[in-house]
Amino acid sequence: MSAQPSTLLSPAVDVSGVSFRYGDKPALQDVSFQVRPAVLFGLLGPNGGGKTTLFRLISTLLPLQQGSIRLLGLDVLSQADAIRRQIGVTFQAPSLDRKLSVFENLACHARLYGLSGNTLASRIQELLARLGLSERARDKVESLSGGLARRVEIAKGLLHSPRLLLLDEPSTGLDPGARLDLWRYLASLRDESGVTVICTTHLMEEAERCDDLALLDHGRIVAQGSPAELRRSLGGDCLTIRGTEPETLAAEITARFGVSVRQVGGELRIDAQNDHSLLGHVLDAFGPRIEAVSLARPTLEDVFVERTGHRFWNE
């Protein structure tokens, strides 16, 4: 985990009151958050939650409709060209030319940023070495595995030494081992180079690797903080019950034990407040009507459910 920066430092990203619509359909509604310098920041949410629209606004691909966004102290409306020189972007969709070699892909992209000659060659060699791609430099992209191709995508975004790296679903198509390698490298960028990394994700295990998170649902931010802070906000263990006639069962559990019961789909959720005896009492009283029960520390999905009233992935 990176060291906590001074509170006197200006935020690397400052999003304030951002709303966006596609015609009559709202995609973002009054979104505000800040990102500290040199952290891994995650935008976590289900598909359709607004992550991609927010990513496109931050990366200057979409024009702002309402609100303001400042990146590295620069305003996206009036200073978009200056911002593009200082950010690196890796999109969810592949953007490599599969018929060119790894080196050729990187060289073409580097020239867009004015790199040439020895500077271009040394920068490419440095990134190939850091990303474990040196031996594949002359290989065509079409011969690479998904994990290796994703590393080349990230190398493209880092060629011009950006201060801010934006990644849209960075582990798309990666196997678990390659995904772990990717997140180790992102952590090294944060720790060794002071790069601020923002990524969108719908994977809870990836979100747990971030220093800070913003949880999005239907275009709104429903929670912000570090993963540990968000889990602690629930205050205790979470008791989850699946049984017959959940509405009736919820009412009876509330009447009997005086606890608040939330129904999420076909499940009942109770904040146990570290009272492990509640599990036994519920089983004693309603055992024949309970199909499954679990007691566990809160997860990020529990936080999402508590803030939205529905599952992360709707059934």
Image (cartoon, grey):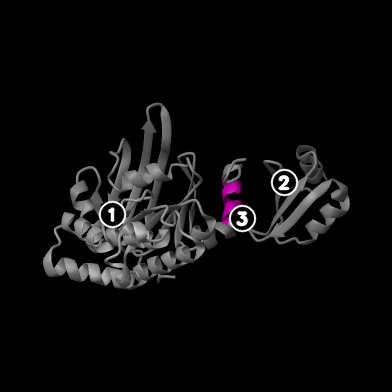
Q: Which mark is residue 99?
A: 1
Amino acid type, residue under disc 1 in the picture = Lys
Q: Nearer the viewer, residue 102 or 29?
A: 102
Res. 92 visible in picture: yes
Q: Secondary structure at mark 1?
A: loop
Residue under pointer 3: 234
Q: CA distance from mark 1 to mark 3?
A: 51 Å
Residue at the farthest left position: 117
Q: Main secondary structure of the magenta part?
A: helix
Residue 282 falls inside the magenta stretch: no
Q: Which residues are magenta?
A: 300-307
Q: What is the crowding at mark 3: few (fewer than 14 residues within 10 Å), some, or many (at least 20)?
A: some
Residue 166 place in picture, x, y as percent? 34, 55
Residue 187 place in picture, x, y as percent? 40, 68
Dot placed on the residue nearer the N-terminal end, 1 or 2: 1
Amino acid type, residue under disc 2 in the picture = Leu
Q: Residue at x 61, y 42 (%)?
A: 309
Q: Residue 134 vs residue 109: left or right?
A: right
Q: Nearer the viewer, residue 274 or 239?
A: 239
Picture layout, residue 96 above or below residue 66: below
- Mark nearest the camera among 2 and 3 is 2
Q: CA distance from mark 2 to mark 3?
A: 16 Å
Q: Secondary structure at mark 3?
A: loop
Q: What is the crowding at mark 1: few (fewer than 14 residues within 10 Å), some, or many (at least 20)?
A: few
Residue under pointer 2: 268
Q: Residue 61 vs residue 274: left or right?
A: left
The N terminus: image quadrant = bottom left
- Mark nearest the camera among 1 and 3 is 1
Picture layout, residue 21 above or below residue 286: above
Q: Nearer the viewer, residue 271 or 268?
A: 268
